[in-house]
Image (cartoon, rainbow, N blue to C red):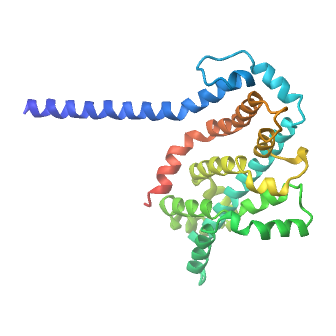
Amino acid sequence: MEQYENKGGMGLKSRRVIAYIVLIFMSVLCLIWFYVLLINATRSHAELTTGFTPIPSTFLLTNWTNLYHSTIPIVNGMINSVIVAGCAAVLSTYFSTMTAFAIHAYEFKAKKAMFTFIMMVMMIPTQVTALGFIQLVSKMKLEDNFIPLIVPAIAAPVTFFYMKQYMESTLPLSLLEAARIDGAGEFRIFNTIVLPLMKPAIAVQAIFTFVSSWNNYFTPALILHDDKKKTLPVLIAQLRSADFLKFDMGQVYVMIAFSIFPVILVYLLLSRNIVGGVSMGAVKG
């Protein structure tokens, strides 16, 4: 009997060792690209053309100074990206949660049809509607404006679907009925009861929406023409497409490294909720 227990214990330990090895390998695989980025940001354009080296160089401050004094308005780009991504994340999560609450908490005839329609919208690629969207923006004279980048983010079918699945596992209808019996209005129920319960899911979707909006290049490149209005992805592409005499790969790497710090900061602030939010949203109770 002791032999079987010893074998079982050894088998469990070996599985744990294998699991830790795999996790460490995956972590290194994910983080090594950040290391490469930071190393390349410290090297000059001439050094970068010779190939990669794991040892940092001494051109980080020089690259940053050259980038800051270049024609690229990097500070304006950072502010623009923060405004667009921050507003998109807040509005998308709030109104998507409100839409999911309406589908989850109320019974009406068009409920199933509305849910199906939202799921169908989720299947339409952005590129398909781009031409009509640009024409609409042009007719409304909203070019070089952040409104076309923020307002459409409110209608986020993917975020709605995730919130709907999360509500089914964490928000009992009996709780809502008890709040109504106590005299609470629907907006008060949503803002004081539903939102606190949905906090982990909101944190998860806020991270995803912020990162998606922050990295978005396609739509801003079509709408924003003034350099002072452009977001960081557009400015990075503009820096990379400079002519041969002005092209500096060191500046490109410094700008990319500069652009990922807000994303890392948002992730660190909200990451404690991401594991619980993903697991609860994926498993229907």
Residue in the image at 59% along x and 73% along y: 120
- Seen at 39% across and 34% down, the residue is 22
Task: Locate the C terminus by quadrant.
Answer: bottom left
Q: Position of residue 108 (x, y in %)?
A: 60, 81
| Up/down of 103 relative to 192, above or below | below
**Does the image show residue 189?**
no
Q: Is residue 160 above or below residue 87?
A: below
Quarter of the picture holding the N terminus:
top left
**Which of the 4 quarters of the picture holds residue 8?**
top left
* Front residue (pair 115, 78): 78
Q: Does 147 sit left or right of 10 as displayed? A: right
- Residue nearest the viewer, comparing 110 with 189: 110
Residue 58 visible in rendering: yes
Residue 81 percent coordinates (x, y): 78, 45
Q: Residue 113, how many percent across, how many down?
A: 58, 80
Locate residue 182: give its quadrant.
bottom right
Q: Is residue 159 above or below residue 279?
A: below
Q: Residue at x 82, y 60 (%)?
A: 148
Q: Nearer the viewer, residue 54 or 51?
A: 51
